[in-house]
Amino acid sequence: MPSDLNSQFLVQIVSTEDVIRSKNLEPELTKLGLQFQISPGIVPNEVDFQTGLLHSAFIFKLLNQRAASIGEVGCALAHRVAMHAFLNSNHKFGIIFEDDAEVISEFDFDILSDLLDSDRPIIVALGWIPGIAVSRNPQITADEVLVELITPPTCTFAYAINRSAAKSIIGGNKRIIDVADWPIYMFNKVHFYAPRLSWV
């Protein structure tokens, strides 16, 4: 099974210094039989950031009610790099981790691949910082593994993605206008799901 998983899923860890900050992530991925590669983090050039070549300061402030930090812009750019690498690979699906993520539950790859194997753009948020997300079905049963969301969770640090969703995000705005995790222009363009109980 792991060799089949590795032919289907391109697993990437976004890291600015080729160092995985999480002590849990590498051993847990190895235990799951997953090979992974480091996707380079982005440290934006200060001048490019200040002059607005990388992001729209006005739209970011309008959407978030505050100015963007250089780190947020770098994070959003790094996720785009990882999605480009996924689209340039032969893999059907991608899984992208930030390097401080920790795996806390075993993945159900059958359910994950069955859902992602679609022409619809789909992202499965595998773990997130507590915040608000609205599920499509208000009555979630105990046997449901993945739940469809109307609104995506914020601050996701691990997600699975299909090719259609990656193309939608890459084909969006060229400059960063929102935080890395599900820019506002993705609403109604990408279908979001999450495990009923977080996996990461």
Image (cartoon, rainbow, N blue to C red):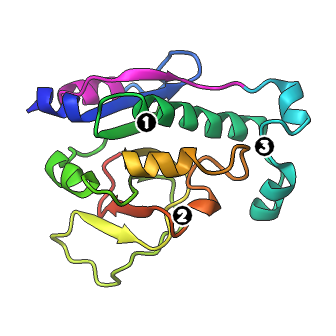
Label 1: how many Cα within 10 Å (few below 14, some 14–19, many 20+): many
Q: Residue at x 63, y 40 (%)?
A: 76
Q: Is residue 148 above or below residue 200?
A: below
Whole-angstrom CA distance, mark 1 to mark 2, is: 19 Å
Query: Where does label 3 land, which residue?
Result: 55
> Could you tell which of marks 1 and 2 lies nearer the N-terminus?
1
Image-based side of 110 in relation to 172, left or right = left
Q: Position of residue 81 (x, y in %)?
A: 55, 31
| Disc ID at residue 131 | 2
Q: Are marks 3 and 2 in contact (CB under 8 Å)?
A: no
Query: Where does label 1 land, which residue?
Result: 97
Image-based side of 7 in relation to 191, left or right = left
Q: Position of residue 55 (x, y in %)?
A: 78, 43
Label 2: how many Cα within 10 Å (few below 14, some 14–19, many 20+): few
Q: Secondary structure at mark 1?
A: strand
Question: Is 34 included in the stretch rendered in magenta?
Answer: yes
Q: Residue at x 75, y 63 (%)?
A: 63
Q: Amino acid at mark 2?
A: Gly
